[in-house]
Every structure is written in structure tokens, then in C-alpha cells.
Image (spheres, rainbow, N blue to C red):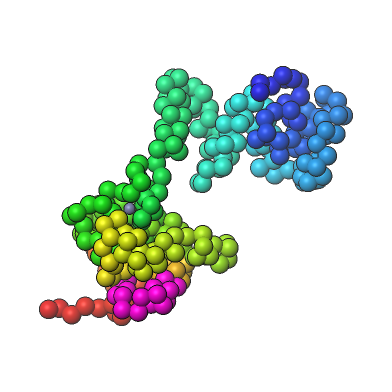
Amino acid sequence: MPDQSPTQPGPNPSASSIPLGPVAPVRASGRQVNAKPVGPKPVGANAVGGRGVGGPGAAGRDRERTLAYPGPVARLIDDLARLPGIGRRAAERLALHLLKAPREVGESLAAAIQQVKSQVGNCRVCSSLTEHDVCGICVSMKRDAGVVLVVEQPRDLLALEAAGMYAGVYHVLLGNLSPMDGIGPDALTVEDLVARVRDAGANARSEPVREVILGLNPTMEGDGTALYLAGRLREVAPGLKVSRLARGLPTGSSLEVVSKAVLADAVSGRRSMD
Ligand SMILES: [Zn+2]
């Protein structure tokens, strides 16, 4: 719905800027327009109004500036600012860029977003991204479907594919365990992996899994997740081979510059020269 009352930019606009309402009336337009704007939103005012009065910081000033934009622009800024890695200032810059750019640029972006949301989903077997029910890797006859490499995200799969050294199939967890953030096994595709190991029929080509390679990132969460998975897989398939990707010295670096943890990994993961 378009903004019907340009004299009251604060409390009126679309739903996306409602939480910002109380800040503007108090500091900027409230006094000039009338005393009412704070009234219609008692919940919001109670929740954040005090902070606005107390002494707004940079964030408050940014919000105030956003509110000065016409409703649709403010909404675009709000939506962009919700994306990971995009702060309020960057969101504003992007929105203004789109506003200034030829119409086709914005339309192409909008169409791309719509297409991604409507046409791309997760593979029914490995949870990688695909435009089909099952992804190309899962159904490929050129891949060894008996070896499953577990990664955290689709981008990890792409990195491994770009290296071109792996000929098995994958399983994408879509994250890693993080008890601090409340992310348990249920939030990931752990049970799908267990099903694949337990029942060959759960795999795209109904081939039994002989080995699971844990390719999680060498972070605290990644290590914790790998440990959990190894235990869980051993539980359901005692004979299954479970390995993890090697880690150690990065090619091209020297011993003196790598961290102690990397050196320790490199020593314990050493390989025979033959
Ligand atoms: Zn797949």
C-alpha cells in the first residue's frame, strides 16, 4: 500500500518499517507533526521508545534516515539489510544503486530471486542444490555411489568438485551442530544420512554405502559434528568405514608460519613416503 500521508513518515509505512516507528516520532518528526504518532503503536513504543529517547547511536541515526525515504525504498533497504553480511549502510547504498540503475537491472535481479526460490531446491537424496528431484551427481553412473562424502554446505561440494579429485557421491548436512545456537542433529540432514547408510534403497541408485568420508570444516563446530556423526554411524552400521579428510600443511606455505594446531594435525596425519 502506498504511503498516503507524507507528513507522517514515521508510524505509517509498510509492515517492514513498523519496528522503526517509535524512533522517528520522538527525535525527528514527532514534535513537528503532532503528539499523536507515538500513540497508535503503544507496544512498539514501550519496547524501544526508551532507547530512542535516551541517546540514539549510529544505528538510530541510520534508521531515522531510512524513514525519510518513500515507503517502497525504505522497505527495500529493510529487506536488503536482513541479508547476511549486509549492514544498514550497505543496504542503503544497494537500494539507491538499484533506484538509479536502468529498469532492466532491477527487473533481472527480481526475476533471478524469484526463479531461484521457485525452481531450485534440495536433492531428495543428498540435499545438495538442484533443479530436479534428485541431483546430477546422485544419479550419475560415472560416480561411485558406495562412497559418500559429507560436507556442511553446497558451496563445500562445489569446491571439491572444482578440485576434480573425488568420484564418489555427497551428503550435504546444511550446517553443523552448534549447541550454543540451539542447532542439534534434527536441524541438519543427519537422519537422511543415517537412512542412506542403513538402507541402500534410500540412495539414488540403490547402491549400499561402503564408506563415509567426513569432510567437515576444521573448526570447533565442524570437529564436534564429525565426532557426533562418526559415533552415530558406528551405532547404526558397525562395519561401515568412516574416514575424514586429511588436514595439515597448506601447499606453498612454510612450517614457521603455520599455526601450532595445523602443525600438530600435520604430524599426527603424516603419510608414509612409499
Ligand atoms: Zn544429490
Q: Using residue 59 as the reference point, say whether residue 204 is left or right of it.
A: left
Q: Position of residue 161 (x, y in %)?
A: 26, 53
Foreground residue among 206 and 257: 206
Q: Using residue 175 as the reference point, say whether residue 171 is left or right of it.
A: left
How many numbered marks, from 0 up? 0
Extent of the magenta region = 227-244
Q: Quadrant of the N terminus?
A: top right
Foreground residue among 175 and 195: 195
Residue at 68 percent of width and 33 percent of height: 15
Q: Quadrant of residue 249?
A: bottom left
User: Looking at the image, is 213 positioned above or below residue 274?
Assistant: above
Q: Position of residue 202 (x, y in %)?
A: 35, 60
Asked if residue 144 can be seen in this view, the reply is yes
Q: Does the magenta-highlighted stretch encompass residue 58?
A: no
Q: Quadrant of the C terminus?
A: bottom left
User: Looking at the image, is 83 positioned above or below residue 164?
Assistant: above
Q: Quadrant of residue 4?
A: top right
User: Looking at the image, is 112 positioned above or below residue 244?
Assistant: above
Residue at 42 percent of width and 71 percent of height: 229
Q: Using residue 240 as the reference point, say whether residue 226 is left or right of it.
A: right
Residue at 66 percent of width and 42 percent of height: 59
Q: Position of residue 105 (x, y in %)?
A: 42, 25
Q: Does the magenta-highlighted stretch encompass residue 233?
A: yes
Residue farthest to the left, as pictured? 274
Foreground residue among 274 and 14: 14
Residue at 40 percent of width and 67 percent of height: 194
Q: Position of residue 47 (x, y in %)?
A: 78, 46
Asked if residue 263 can be seen in this view, the reply is no
Q: Using residue 196 as the reference point, say whether residue 12 is left or right of it.
A: right
Residue farthest to the right, as pictured? 35
